[in-house]
């Protein structure tokens, strides 16, 4: 059996037996990996708090390369992200990030870029309060990294650069529709050029600078409608954590 060592982020864990846990990780080297943590449910488990969701750790596991379920050997915490767990809005946002990665990636799908997106987003989430912008950035960026980047520079129908006041977005065509073609395509969403400019910024903005992007409230709601529906168009359902995020916004 091969021994694997990599940095990883815990996506989720579930009880696997009376004493064991089944843990899903997003690893730096090997993509999404599932492993059994023996005796992890016991009070004096050697894994301690290392298997809590969002924990960044150095992971060692073993098994055959073509199997779907590995056995965990050792976990050393690099960063616990405990401040995220102490704030409900940040907690559910972090869980949402984990759910998106877990739902959109198959086991063994490898993407160091997605690993870095998750790690950097958790770091920003811990240090800053601009959770709304960070959620929108994460949504559009994960879809782009999976190869479905929305077309924002040219009309998906006539291929011209949109110059009209109002612009549409078609989820079927995967991008914007110019004002001339709106009546022909009947896009799912219609918005102003200001919203389009912010969408473009979210696609290229350094995550470490996400707290500097201040989106006006009205445009913020339009962007949520676009990026969240973009996610739903690929996931096919609402994730469990998102209603809790919306509840937090009303408090």
Image (cartoon, rainbow, N blue to C red):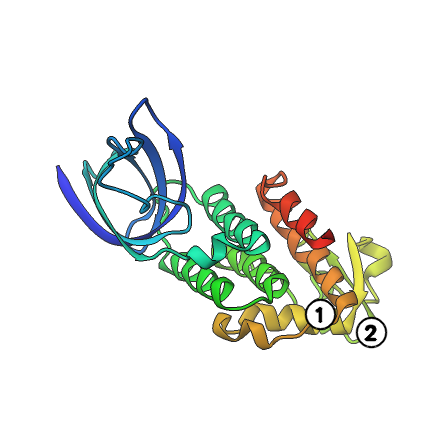
| Disc assigned to residue 134 | none
Task: Tell me: 251 left or right of 11.
Answer: right
Task: Tell me: 250 left or right of 46.
Answer: right
Extreme-right residue of the structure: 183
Instruction: Give the mark, 2 or 1, whose residue is nearer the N terminus.
Output: 2
Rendering coords of residue 174 (x, y %): 65, 55
The quadrant in which residue 151 appears is: bottom right
Q: Is residue 172 visible?
A: no
Extreme-top residue of the structure: 18
Q: CA distance from mark 2 to mark 1?
A: 12 Å
Which residue is nearer to you in this view: 161 or 53? 53
Rendering coords of residue 61 (x, y %): 21, 42
- Residue 189 vs 163, above or below: the answer is above
Residue occupying image coordinates x 29% and y 29%: 20
Q: Are marks 2 and 1 in contact (CB under 8 Å)?
A: no
- Residue 103 vs 137, above or below: the answer is above
The quadrant in which residue 25 appears is: top left
Rendering coords of residue 52 (x, y %): 38, 45
Which residue is nearer to you in this view: 24 or 53? 53
Label 2 sits on a secondary structure element that is: loop
Task: Report which residue position mark 2 lands on.
Answer: 164
Q: Residues within 10 Å of mark 1 (few under 14, many from 20)?
A: many
Task: Report which residue position mark 1 lands on.
Answer: 196
């Amino acid at each position: 059996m091969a021994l694997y060592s990599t940095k990883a982020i815990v996506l989720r864990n579930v009880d696997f037996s009376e004493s064991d846990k089944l843990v899903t990780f997003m690893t730096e080297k090997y993509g999404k990996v599932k492993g059994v943590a023996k005796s992890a449910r016991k009070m004096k488990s050697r894994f301690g708090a290392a298997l809590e969701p969002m924990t960044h750790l150095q992971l060692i596991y073993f098994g055959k390369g073509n199997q779907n379920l590995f056995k965990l050997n050792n976990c050393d915490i690099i960063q616990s992200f405990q401040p995220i767990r102490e704030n409900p809005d940040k907690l559910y946002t972090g869980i949402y990030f984990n759910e998106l990665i877990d739902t959109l990636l198959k086991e063994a799908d490898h993407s160091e870029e997605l690993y870095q997106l998750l790690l950097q987003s958790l770091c920003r989430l811990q240090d800053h309060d601009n959770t709304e912008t960070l959620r929108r950035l994460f949504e559009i960026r994960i879809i782009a990294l999976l190869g479905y980047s929305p077309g924002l520079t040219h009309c998906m129908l006539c291929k011209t650069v949109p110059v009209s006041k109002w612009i549409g977005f078609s989820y079927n065509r995967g991008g914007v529709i110019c004002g001339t073609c709106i009546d022909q395509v009947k896009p799912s969403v219609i918005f102003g050029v200001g919203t389009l400019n912010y969408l473009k910024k979210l696609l290229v903005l350094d995550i470490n600078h996400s707290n500097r992007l201040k989106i006006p409230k009205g445009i913020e709601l339009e962007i949520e409608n676009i990026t969240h529906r973009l996610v739903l168009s690929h996931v096919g359902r609402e994730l469990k954590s998102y209603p809790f995020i919306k509840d937090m916004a009303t408090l």
